[in-house]
Image (tube, rainbow, N blue to C red):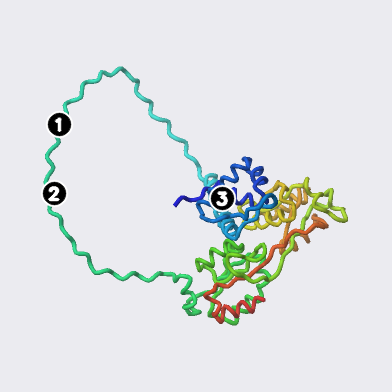
């Protein structure tokens, strides 16, 4: 099977972010024909149509395209993380200087003697007679150490802990309720996977059976698996108090087109959600001038007037309340990020899991 290339996945991701094949070609620095070729080859290798074809307008992903995009962004993110980790590793390891090569002896003229006549190959010894071994009776396979997803519901509560996928900011709303559940059900342990908080990661974890339920961020209803809407978290834009827009009564999209953004690093799993929201709000062309997962650095840059800091949810409430920042009265809507919930299908009849769902309302 011929695998998709990273360039093809990057083309798919860029089209989704930029909104059109032409804009993606500009962002990638290639021709529109090249972008179209990448998508055509990718569709051939996947055996599906990734876009709903129409003349002009915005490039719209098909249902299969939405699924492929989530996987593509996951692969690209993992590749970026691989490069970053190797750079970090390379910076920590001391490179030993290479030893100087031994000086080569001075080359002098060599007279070549004719080769000796080839000696006849010795007669091969006769092979011993073949020994036919009778195979032993088949040994029954050992049972799997971890049951597949379909068998999760057959485990007893004591054997199967409840694993919640969630972002730390989401879980802060449930801390007291989660503690109350643990007091009520001391024999059913609960743990949290803090790396599983976006729909693509949740889809993989649910299919692999590594989580029991998840509270995650998404842009609207999930198509790959059913989920329940809980609440929405809206974006807020922050600048320094002496920023040129800080004293405006209203700020519109056109006022921000010359600004730069301060936000998550490219490998952050919240970055695709931010980019999707900005594209839908008409701000997809704004450049990222500071990219960091260190909120302290982002806030310091915003206070210094370096650019606009977009925040949502608990981060907006916490950081926005700090001194030295002013929230812009942005009049044009930025799509909110939804918080949604999913429970593994095999645990829908698990009374204690359902009790936890009811507790975390």
Q: Nearer the viewer, residue 249 or 39?
A: 39
Q: Is residue 2 left or right of residue 122?
A: right
Residue 211, placed above or below residue 97: below
Q: Disc 1 marks which residue?
A: 119
Work out whether residue 297 can be spotted: no
Element at badge 1?
loop
Q: Disc 2 marks which residue?
A: 127
Q: Dot 3, crowdedness within 10 Å: few (<14), some or many (≥20)?
A: many
Q: Dot 1, crowdedness within 10 Å: few (<14), some or many (≥20)?
A: few
Image point 56% across, 64% down: which residue? 203
Element at badge 2?
loop
* Percent x, y of residue 131: 15, 57
Residue 351, placed above or below residue 85: below
Which mark's residue is nearer the viewer, 3 or 2? 3
Separation of residues labelled 2 and 1 (CA atoms) = 23 Å
* Percent x, y of residue 289: 70, 46
Image point 81% across, 49% down: which residue? 254
Work out whether residue 277 can be spotted: yes
Residue 179, placed above or below residue 80: below
Quadrant of residue 143 within the rendered picture: bottom left
Q: Disc 3 marks which residue?
A: 9
Separation of residues labelled 1 and 3 (CA atoms) = 60 Å
* Percent x, y of residue 301: 74, 49
Q: Residue furthest front?
A: 55
Q: Nearer the viewer, residue 280 or 134?
A: 280
Separation of residues labelled 3 and 2 (CA atoms) = 55 Å
Q: Which mark is residue 267?
A: none
* Percent x, y of residue 22: 66, 45
Quadrant of residue 316 within the rendered picture: bottom right
């Amino acid at each position: 099977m011929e695998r998709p290339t990273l360039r093809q996945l990057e083309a798919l991701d860029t089209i989704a972010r930029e909104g059109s094949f032409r804009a993606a070609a500009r962002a990638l620095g290639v021709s529109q024909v090249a972008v179209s070729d990448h998508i055509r080859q990718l569709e051939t290798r996947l055996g599906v149509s990734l876009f709903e074809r129409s003349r002009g307008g915005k490039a719209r992903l098909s249902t299969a395209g939405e699924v492929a995009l989530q996987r593509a962004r996951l692969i690209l993110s993992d590749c970026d993380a691989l490069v970053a980790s190797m750079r970090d590793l390379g910076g920590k390891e001391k490179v030993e200087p290479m030893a100087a090569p031994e000086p080569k002896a001075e080359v002098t003229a060599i007279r070549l003697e004719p080769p000796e006549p080839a000696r006849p190959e010795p007669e091969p010894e006769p092979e011993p007679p073949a020994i036919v071994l009778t195979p032993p009776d088949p040994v029954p396979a050992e049972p799997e150490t971890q049951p597949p997803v379909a068998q999760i519901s057959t485990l007893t509560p004591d054997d199967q802990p409840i694993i919640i996928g969630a972002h730390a900011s989401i879980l802060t709303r449930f801390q007291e309720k989660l503690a109350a559940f643990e007091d009520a059900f001391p024999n059913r342990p609960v743990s949290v996977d803090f790396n599983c908080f976006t729909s693509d990661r949740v889809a993989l974890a649910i299919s692999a059976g590594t989580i029991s339920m998840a509270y995650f961020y998404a842009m609207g209803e999930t198509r790959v698996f059913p989920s329940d809407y809980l609440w929405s978290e809206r974006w807020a834009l922050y600048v320094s108090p002496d920023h040129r827009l800080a004293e405006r009564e209203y700020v519109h999209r056109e006022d921000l087109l010359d600004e730069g953004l301060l936000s998550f690093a490219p490998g952050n799993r919240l970055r695709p959600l931010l980019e999707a929201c900005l594209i839908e709000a008409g701000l997809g062309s704004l450049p990222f001038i500071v990219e960091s997962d260190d909120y302290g650095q982002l806030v310091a840059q915003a206070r210094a007037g370096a650019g606009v800091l977009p925040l949502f949810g608990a981060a907006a409430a916490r950081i926005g309340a700090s001194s030295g920042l002013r929230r812009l009265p942005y009049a044009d809507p930025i799509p909110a990020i939804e918080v949604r919930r999913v429970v593994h299908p095999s645990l829908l009849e698990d009374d204690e899991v359902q009790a936890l769902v009811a507790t975390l309302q």
